Amino acid sequence: MTREQYGQSLTAIGRHREVAVQFLEAARLIADDQENGAAHANVAWLAAEALRRSGQLAEARAAFLRTAELFAALGDTVPRVRCLRSAAWLDFGPAPDQPRDAERPRVAALRSVLAELEAATAEGDPADLTAELEATRKQLDAMRAEPDDADEDEGADEGADD
């Protein structure tokens, strides 16, 4: 709790690298406490956000994916989906062995999230999942509208924000 509170204080003054350290340590300290699964997932999410804000994008992507797994174990779909979307935005360009015209990894990742949400809403259609479905569709459209790597090499701006 102390590390989380200290991390929140550091967030207020924009010291995101230090925030990430505090939240990662808080998550580590409660990782084995099964009674604090929700707290562990929440502080892990805060750590992922802090890593992203501090520019540690590969670490942030990995943290979002781990956090999505924590939320999945809790059966908490909405934050899980939000973590998966955040991770998708942090996917980088195509792998070197991938064909030039292959779908970008971030688009493929978000398509996967969308398919999962569509299946879940077809089963019961709770309002919170419907809202996440709409947000995911909008973000997928935004991703697909981004210039590809060739356009970026020619000086086009990439502007993807979660």
Image: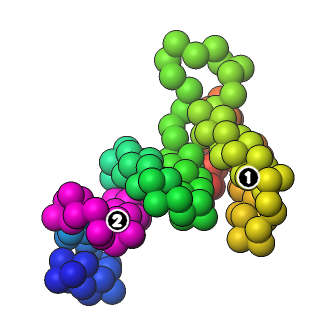
Judged from this view, the residue extending furthest toward the front is 35
Residue in the image at 21% along x and 58% along y: 32
Using the numbered discs, state the Cα–Cα distance from disc 2 to disc 1 in whole angstroms.
23 Å
Kindly indicate the quadrant of the structure image that contains residue 162. Answer: bottom right
The percent position of residue 4, horizontal first and vertical second, equals 25, 78
Q: Which residue is mark 2?
A: 37
Instruction: Check the picture and name the quadrant holding the N terminus.
Output: bottom left
Residue in the image at 39% along x and 49% along y: 66
Question: In front here: 109 or 58?
Answer: 109
Callout 2: 10 Å neighbours few (<14), some, many (20+)? some
Question: In front here: 94 or 65?
Answer: 65
Looking at the image, is mark 2 or mark 1 earlier in the sequence? Answer: 2
Left/right placement of residue 119 relative to residue 45 reads: right
Q: Are marks 2 and 1 in contact (CB under 8 Å)?
A: no
Magenta extent: 28-53
Residue in the image at 68% along x and 22% along y: 102
Q: Which residue is mark 1?
A: 120
> Disc 1 marks which amino acid?
Ala
